[in-house]
Amino acid sequence: MQASEKPRLWDASDRFYNLPAKELESSHWSSITNLDHLSCSDESSQGNCTLESSSGSAPYHINDSPSTKRFSPDGSPTSKRASVPDSCAQDHLNELELKVRELETVMLGPSSDMPHTGDINFLVGSGQISQETETCNELMEIVSRRDLKEILIACAKAVEDNDTLRFEWLVSELRPMVSVSGDPIQRLSAYMLEGLIARLACSGSSIYKALKCKEPAGAELLSYMHILYEICPYFKFGYMSANGAIAEAMKDENIIHIIDFQIAQGSQWITLIQALAARPGGPPCIRITGIDDLGSAYARGGGLEIVGQRLSRLAEACRVPFQFHACGVPASEVEIGLLPIRAGEAVAVNFPLMLHHIPDESVCSQNHRDRLIRMAKSLSPRVVTLVEQESNTNTAPFFSRFLETLNYYMAIFESIDMALPREHKERVNVEQHCLARDIVNLIACEGIERVERHELLGKWRLRFIMAGFNPYPLSSFVNATIKSLLSSYCDKYTLEERDGALYLGWMNRPLVASCAWR
């Protein structure tokens, strides 16, 4: 099967961050709020990028400062303390005073409103240790455990609280622990950390836009998406389940019109054309309307005419009557007048991993997400296929969305880790070019700038029912075909059928859902 994928499960990008673990310099992080753009170099195949300040004078680094001391596993500062007799109660108080001062400096800076150490006897005696001090103690315990995931979550909480000093301190601890060449949590944390930095610096949208792909050339066309397509079954699962539903619904039709709301390379339709060519009684006439933003031409090396030519050559070789209509507009701007519907043809509508990019009522008053679903209903289709990530990030507040993104992409990175050795030179490129851009958008951007807005299938089901659709359960043949597909991959992939829909997962975590409607 030709590998050419819908680049919207994880949008391809030109290059992203290269964050090897290294010792941090000892200068103070001058300003987190000056970050507003990326500086990328093409010196290696891994696409090195550094974050720079708005002045463009030097790469952006987060470094240790006098206020960001490290702590040992027992919770004590690693800097040298005065030796004191353990039998002296007053010396115990002096030691506590020192720790409180350290914590005050880290959390609130030297000019905080925390009580001065002269007041510590009152605080200890009365039990009125401040909430800030309790938070510091909790953070000390987290850092001392050296649990990367735990520290990353603490960083996100600091961003949610807009606590720059706390975030700075945690980042100084986290930086040496993350790497795009490490294990799955180290690699994912590298990208999520940059998303947090961009969010706190209010530069998320600038970074996201800067990650647009350059137009590829020759053999490099979609090479990284091709690798992801081959090593993981996510795209194939979506293609096979949607094609199976369409073939079943169109088994008695002579003229078929497929409206694909994200045609990409058109590769989904190769196997369907081949299958329909072998249909008893002869193949039907097939028309495909391919919708895709002209700005996505970089993913094809040209416009939609390339897709039409490729599919036309295949159909001719299979002796299938075929027509292709290009609709080069963003899906959110498609109107029914742009769709060349003809009398007597059976219509199928395909929504392949793209509706989550369409803004809904929580983003703009037009609510194009529901508008497209209602427009599909107005075409009286034989079947509508929907494939989407099983994730809840659309209206979730920042911290909940961060946790959802962490858990979802952790499963993705683990599945890649099982398919490609960590020393594989292309693995970093696959993750940077196919995954990192979406991760940054989910974490750093808000409002109309955040285009990654996933919903669980339960919410999609409500939208389709409200538009007047009824479920069209996938056949047992489709289920058996996908089970056969998964047998050639790692046994940690799971397939679940529930309420007429199929869920592809990793270790029982659902990742992609597929369903059909009529």
Image (cartoon, grey):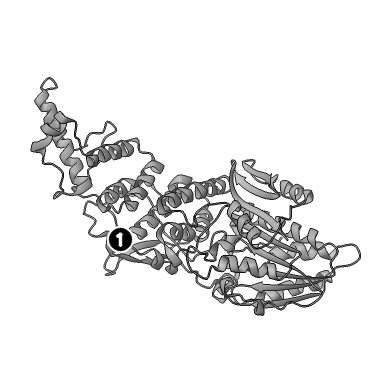
Residue at the extreme top of the image, as rendered: 87
Residue 322 lies in quadrant: bottom right
- Quadrant location, the C terminus: bottom right
Q: Residue 115, position in %: x, y?
A: 13, 41
Residue 125: x, y in percent? 14, 29
Q: Position of residue 313 (x, y in %)?
A: 76, 74
Question: In this image, 212 relative to 502: left or right?
Answer: left
Q: Nearer the viewer, residue 122 or 289?
A: 122
Place of residue 280 in the rendered image (x, y in percent of width and height, measured from the top left): 90, 62
Q: Callout 1 environment at 10 Å: few (<14), some (14 to 19), or many (20+)?
A: many
Answer yes or no: is residue 82 visible: no
Describe residue 252's horizontal placement relative to residue 479 as left or right. right
Secondary structure of residue under mark 1: loop
Circle 1 residue:
60
Say if 343 sits above or below 136 in the image: below
Residue nearest the viewer, comparing 175 with 181: 175
* Badge count: 1
Query: Looking at the figure, which quarter contains the N terminus?
Result: bottom right
Q: Is residue 330 above or below residue 475?
A: below
User: Image point 29% across, 57% down: which residue?
Assistant: 61
199 left or right of 423 in image: left
Tell me the amino acid under the disc marked 1: Tyr
Q: Nearer the viewer, residue 386 or 66?
A: 386
> Front-most of 275 and 353?
353
Residue sticking out furthest to the right: 281
Q: Establish if 278 lies above or below 97.
A: below
Q: Is residue 233 left or right of residue 59?
A: right
The answer to whether residue 155 of the structure is visible from this angle is: yes
